[in-house]
Each structure stands twice: as C-alpha cells, then as structure tokens.
Image (cartoon, rainbow, N blue to C red):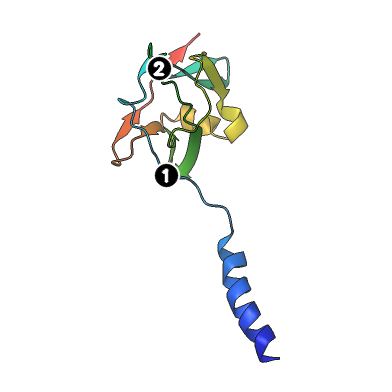
Amino acid sequence: MRRWFYLFAIIIPIAWTGCRSVPSPGLSLKDANMAEGPVLIQRGDHFYLRYRRNIDPQGQNLLSPLVSKRKGDAVYYYFTIPTTSTEWGNLVERPLAFDGYEDFARQGQVYWLDPDGATHLVPVRKE
C-alpha cells in the first residue's frame, strides 16, 4: 500500500505539469545568417512567416528547427540549436494559422526571440 502511495505521489505532479517542454532559443537572429526575412506576409486575411537562410559556402549548413511560443499578449518565433540535418536555404512561408497566431499578427504582436532574451518585431508586408 505504501509503495502505491509513493508511486502516485511522484506520477501525479508530473501529469499535472505535463511532459511537454518547449526548447529554448539556440540561435540569434544575427547568427541565423538570413538571406531574407523574417517578415510577415499578409495575403487577404491570412499571414505567413517568411524567411530564407543563406547557404554557407564551406558546406556547414545545419538546420535549426523553428519554434514558436506564446507569452502574455505576444508570440515569439525562434530557432533552437542546430541539428545534424542539412539546411538547404529554401524559402519558407509558414502559415500563422497553423500555429493559431493570426490574431497576434493583426495586432502587431509577433516577435523574433534571441537566446539572450532580446526581441525583434517582425515587420508585416502586404502582397
């Protein structure tokens, strides 16, 4: 009986807090070496986060996954630490509707987040 009590005492707090963790920023906007963007593209009522990274001529093109998080009345996008996958330098247009953040774009509350906590407002461009 005591063993079950201790088991539940450990499992219940983990279940309440959730097992999902959001990775922290690992690459600053400056270090991301962007060829284009980041910029929010507005087409009608929809918004897209557009960016393209430069290709390193020495072939050191490691992919850094894009992550988003909501904090208060704003949304923050950022790159995590580079993975062992290759970055090809393709143009990326991520629909903000995919993340449920189009209302934040309409209010001008979409930012890029650096590892040091610095934020950069992502500008909006209409097409």
State whether residue 103 is above or below residue 72. above
Please tell me which residue is depicted at 38% across the width and 21% down the height of the picture: 123
* Residue annotated with mark 1: 24
> Looking at the image, which is closer to me, 83 or 73?
83
Work out which quarter of the rendered image holds the N terminus and state it: bottom right
Q: Mark 2 falls on what kind of element?
A: strand
| Distance CA(mark 2)–CA(mark 1) | 21 Å
Tell me which residue sits at (42%, 47%) in the image.
Answer: 72
Towards the viewer: 10 or 88:
88
Location of residue 110 with respect to 18 vertically, above or below: above
Residue 84 drawn at (x, y percent): 50, 31
Query: In the rendered image, which residue does mark 2 sit on?
Result: 37
- Residue 51 in picture, x, y percent from top left: 46, 18
Residue flagged by tag 2: what amino acid is it? Gly
In percent of width and height, residue 67 lies at 49, 36
2 vs 1, front mark: 1
| Residue under the image location 38 percent in, 38 percent down | 26
Q: Nearer the viewer, residue 33 or 51?
A: 33
- Circle 1 sits in a helix, a strand or a loop, which is it? loop
Q: In the image, what residue type sits under mark 1?
A: Ser
Residue 100 place in picture, x, y as percent: 58, 35
